[in-house]
Amino acid sequence: MIRCIDIVKDYHVQQGVRRVLDHVNFEVQRGQKLGVLGRNGAGKSTLIKIVGGVEVATSGHIERTMTVSWPLAFSGAFQGSLTGLDNLRFICRIYGLDYPSTWRYVDDFAELGRQLGEPVKTYSSGMRARLAFALSIAIEFECYLIDEVIMVGDARFYQRCQDELFTKRSDRALIVVSHDMNFIRDVCDTAAVIHDSTFTMCGSVTDAIDFYHAL
Amino acid sequence: MGSLVNVAFLQIRVVLALIMREMHTRYGRENIGFLWVIGEPILFCAGVALMWTAMRPAHEHGLPVTAIVITGYVPLTMWRHCIMRGVKAFESNGALLFHRQVTPLDIITARVALEVLGTLMAGLIVSLAAMAIGVMEAPVDIGLVYLGLAYHVVFSYASALLVAALSEKSEVVEKSISVISYLSLPFSGTFTMVDWVPQNFQWILLLSPSVHNVEMIRGGQFGPGVHPHYNIAFDTWTTGLMLVLGLSLTLRVRRHIVVQ
């Protein structure tokens, strides 16, 4: 289970302090799939980063009783000047994974071929997403934090994600940020909307989508 | 207790992984690659030692000049490299902070470990080479040399922690680090021994922990031929205070880091 208790996040901006999240409370149970909706800049990515422990909340705290992935997003997690393989080796070391078998798995899943030996900064966002996704699946987290990334992959990659994450690992929890309402409707069993720094848990996914469209 | 041991092992694993990564990003895999960790300080120490040996009289205040240079430049290089690697270390490593087990403290620890190991090995190689060609003698009291170096490693680590945390919070600190490191040269103890300075000014030099460390190293190198001024108690509490301050700032800096 993941429990967010009274999360507040303030950013220091040019005009003073901006409150991005104001006393956010929610829980995600094992296997639960939570979709988070909101306009651009509403604080969805910030929330995902706080849940993932990348950023520290201004106040409030988070209890995690399952392993949580790093936020799978467009940026972050990889060092651009290093090759895909060097990044892979680093992540294997810090998560205590066996390098050769992880390498084989990622190579097979991400289908990056020889590009894996090139610096990550030369990757397109789709290729980066494939690498990040393959690695996080190899680590077998109990909860995945997904910030839009699946949507940048091609059809074949999308199908792989479907098979590996939503079918084979349907017992895993997910927190997904997306603007793709069909995706949210297909994948999530609960949904919430962030608006005006307030987090509102909705009764059903359909309610959340209606609320989002009414904004 | 068991979980504490696990956490310790995890952090050691993370620091080792960061050291490997740092070597790859900085030196790549081409030509001698990571050997530059040692090569860089060797070039610096050997270059300065050669220049001073050639330009200066063979003895300074009755001490052989090559040994003075090596015992001064190794600690100086260690400290300068450590603080330079501390500046904006978190911003340039922001991508790594995406992984929860990587902490700001690990990043600095890995960077300092790499610099310290590099300069120590470079110092060892340059000293052995200088001894082999007969311009330097073996240390009289190797224990005191080690003690001075050990204090200096902690001092460099503490300085790097302070610089890393403060440069993240303040642009003024970030921009002024290179000036500060230049202006502090007289307080490094590299160029003078306390005994060479008039007695009523000695206390000024002795405010700097670095001076105490270099005095210890030179005391060990030259033995009864010199009169080193150092105070272990003063060195311990000033360095200790810096370390505690540096650690507490670094452990709290995460709030101020905006990860891309």
Image: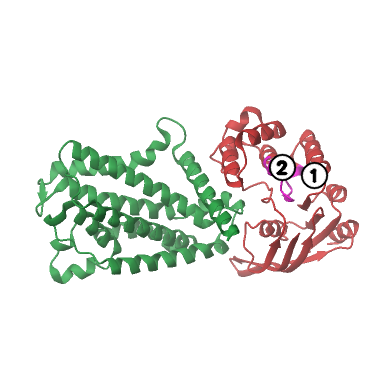
Helix, strand or loop at mark 1: loop
The answer to if A144 sits in the magenta stretch is: yes
Question: Considering depth in this image, is A66 or B1 the residue closer to the camera?
Answer: B1
| Pointer 2 with pointer 1, Cβ within 8 A | yes
Task: Determine crowd level at label 1: few under 14, some 14-19, many 20+ residues with C-alpha closer than 10 A.
Answer: some
- Label 2: how many residues lie within 10 Å, few (<14), some (14-19) or many (20+)? some
Q: Position of residue B172 (x, y in %)?
A: 43, 63
Q: Where is residue A111 drawn, in percent x and y?
A: 70, 31
Give the residue pinned by disc 2. Answer: A137
Q: Is residue A210 left or right of residue B192?
A: right
Inspect the image, locate mark 2, and give the three-letter code of the amino acid beneath it.
Ile
Q: Which residues are magenta?
A: A135-151
Which residue sits at x=34%, y=41%? B40
- Decide: is B51 above or below B30: below
Give the chain of mark 1: A
Which residue occupies 57% across, 56% down? B7
Residue A169, which numbered label? 1
Q: Which chain is red?
A: A
Q: CA distance from mark 2 to mark 1?
A: 9 Å
* Three-letter code, disc 1: Arg
Same-subunit check for callouts 2 and 1: yes
